[in-house]
Structure formats: C-alpha cells, structure tokens
Amino acid sequence: MTTFETIAKLVAESKDLDVNSIKPEMTFADLGLDSLDVAELVMNMEDELGVTIEISPALKTVQDVVALVDAQKK
Amino acid sequence: MIIRSFGHALPKRIVTNDELARFLDTSDEWIQSHTGIQSRRVLTGGETLSALGAQAAEMALERAGMTAADIDYILCSTTRGEMFFPSTSCLVQQKIGAGCPCLDINAGCTGFLYALDTADALLESGKAKRLLIVCAEQLSRLTDWTDRSTCVLFGDAAGAAICERGDGIKAVRLTAEGDAAYLHGWPSGGNSPFDDQIPTEKPLYMNGQEIFKFAVTRSLRDVETVMDESAITADAVDYFVLHQANRRILDAVRARLKQPEEKFPVNITDHGNTSSACIPVLLSEMEGDGRLKKGQTLVLSAFGAGLTTGAAVLQY
C-alpha cells in the first residue's frame, strides 16, 4: 500500500467516508477534520507507518502529510 | 496506602461559554465541540487559593470523621501557588489549624498522581500516619485571557484526600520527559535592574494538537502498564478516572480500551480543566453522589506540563 493509500484509509475510517472520495489535494478542512481530528489522525499514522510527524500549520492537505512521511521513509 | 475519603471545593463564580464569547472570538458551539466544556468556575477578587484548599480539606476530614489535629503531613499539589512563599500547603495548614510538616509539589496537571506516590512513600516508611493531600489550582490567574485557544479550557478548583497506611495502591507509574516546548507557564517578570531579558511571552502557552497526541498515547500506555502490573483487565475496572483536560482525549482513550462511557466519569463539562485538582474533585463528587464505593477498583491517569504523566490502580 502506498503512503497515500494508507493515509486515505485512515482518514476514511476516522470520518466514515468512502476511501475513493479522498484525493491528495483535499485539505483536512474539506474532509471535515478539525484540529483535534488531525491530531488523532497523525497519531494513527505514526502507529501504522512507524514515523514521527510534528503537527504544524503547514500540514493542510493530504498530500502535505504524504510528502512529510515519504521524506522520513527515505 | 489507602484513601479514607475525598473532599472538594469550587469557587462560586460560574463563567459560561456565552460569557467568554462576549470578549473573545469564540462560540459555545466551538468550545463544546472541541473540548466538551460548557462552563467553568473561577476565583474572583479577594478569594484565595488556600481558602479553597482548606474548604476541600475540611470536607475530606469530615467524611473521614477526623479533625485537622489528626493530620501529621500535608502535601499540596499546585501549578500556580497562592504565593511563591510561604508554600500553599503552609497556608492551607494555617487555615485548617493543623500542626505538621507541609510540602508543595508541582508536576503540572499530573500533580495528584505525584502526590499519591509521595504520600505512599511517606506512609510506608513511617514518616507519616495520616496524610492530607490537597490539589489546589487557580489557572484563571495564570492564563492569557486574550488567547482564545487556551483561556477557555481552564477552571479553578481544589480537591483533597486523606491517606493512611494500607494496601489500596496496587500499582503506580510516574514519568517525566522534561520539555517545555509544547506546554508552559511563565511567572510574571519582576523588575531586576540586572536582568535585561525579563520574559515578555504570554503567561501560559499550549500547543493543543501536540499535547492531545501526548495525552492520548501516554495515558493509554500508562493505563495498560499499571493494569498489567496489578494483573487486572480493563473489564475488571469499575472506573477509569482520567485527568479532565479535554472530553475528546477521554473519548480517544476510551475507544482504544473498548470500554463503555459510564466507566469514564466526567466533570470537565461544568468545571473545565482544573489541572491537578481534576481527579480528586471528580472522586469527591462521586463519593458524594454514591457512585464511588469502598472496595471498587479505580484506574487513575493524568498528564500535564513537564511533560509529566502518572497512573495508578487504586482499590478504594
């Protein structure tokens, strides 16, 4: 599973969404996630992907998080 | 160590979310959906923290059928004492009329767990026989009331517990990861002519998202550790009494432990986050309304500035 697919799955689970409706360019606000939903999502990603993600205002879209995770995996 | 009784006290002044929305860019809907808080109590002019602590102590003494003269040690947990000195425990001692050693502890919102562990050591070593813990907090006098992301979260309160030697504590775990970056409070600046870098930062700062992550992951880890150490399962626990920082932290921990809502008592709705007073105030309220009964198994878990955490399995 790619990083995007893993993150899309976690977002879909957290908000009960259709995983296919999640696109990389969507913001967390578009997906109905507030600041604490994002924190919980990051926690779940850290568990699932074995990375550490510092939450910052720069993390707005799904792609922003994918890029951060992929940079750590390299 | 066993706990004989709990007590608590709250300031009279109630501040609703709507009242905050009159001077902050916030709303009742936002505060409730992000925190679970509807209102909080705050100290007003002339009201002192030690008087609130003494009131909580007196309730605990009365419930235990004791007087202040029976107490031979006072531990006070506070993040923002009434004064730098005397210690808040000394000020409480004077008000209740006790005569015994007094010691303040500051472990942020984890203070009650740190106090419990210290009390356990003092009682088991024979240094004390009847010990009073008072958690007295006045974060309303530390928060920046122009910062809508933090000032809406906190309230003032005091909780107390009377402790004696016994085998009620089944396991305790305390941790600290010294780091001020995400959560800290500054004292006011002072006026030293030799200090050209007097802090001008906000009195209280918190990165809510990072602290949320810290709280959920560490609380879950600590709760599982103390349950393992005392060989009990989550299903065997009567109540999980967690630090009341945010309703959504409680929900996230509860979902991961797969436990029903009624096993996670809540008082954040009416009190906000009262720092180290949250847990003893909640237990005192449960003692008062009959939910808390002798013999029940409780898991306590707190987390706060330090960053500190603490958890315990306690048979009441």
Image: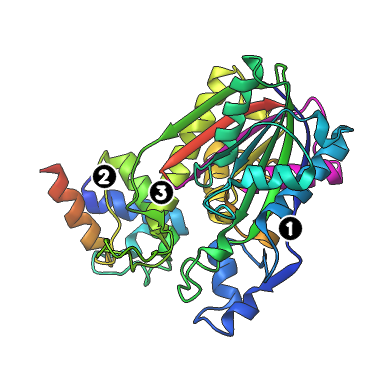
On the image, the x and y values in percent for residue A71 come to: 13, 50
Q: Which residues are magenta?
A: B277-305
| Inter-mark Cα distance, 2 to 1 | 40 Å
The chain holding disc 1 is B
For the residue pair B203 and B33, the one nearer the viewer reads as B203
Q: Amino acid at mark 1?
A: Leu
Looking at the image, is A24 positioned above or below residue B125? below
In percent of the image, x 26 and y 44: which residue is there? A52
The chain holding disc 2 is A
On the image, the x and y values in percent for residue B148 come to: 48, 73
- Left or right for B227, reference B73: left
Q: Secondary structure at mark 2?
A: loop
Q: Secondary structure at mark 3?
A: helix
- Left or right for B92, reference B304: right
Q: Which residue is mark 2?
A: A52
Q: Amino acid at mark 3?
A: Lys
Mark 2 or 1: in front is: 1
Q: Amino acid at mark 2?
A: Thr
Q: Which residue is mark 1?
A: B10
Q: Which residue is mark 3?
A: B213
Mark 3 or 1: in front is: 1
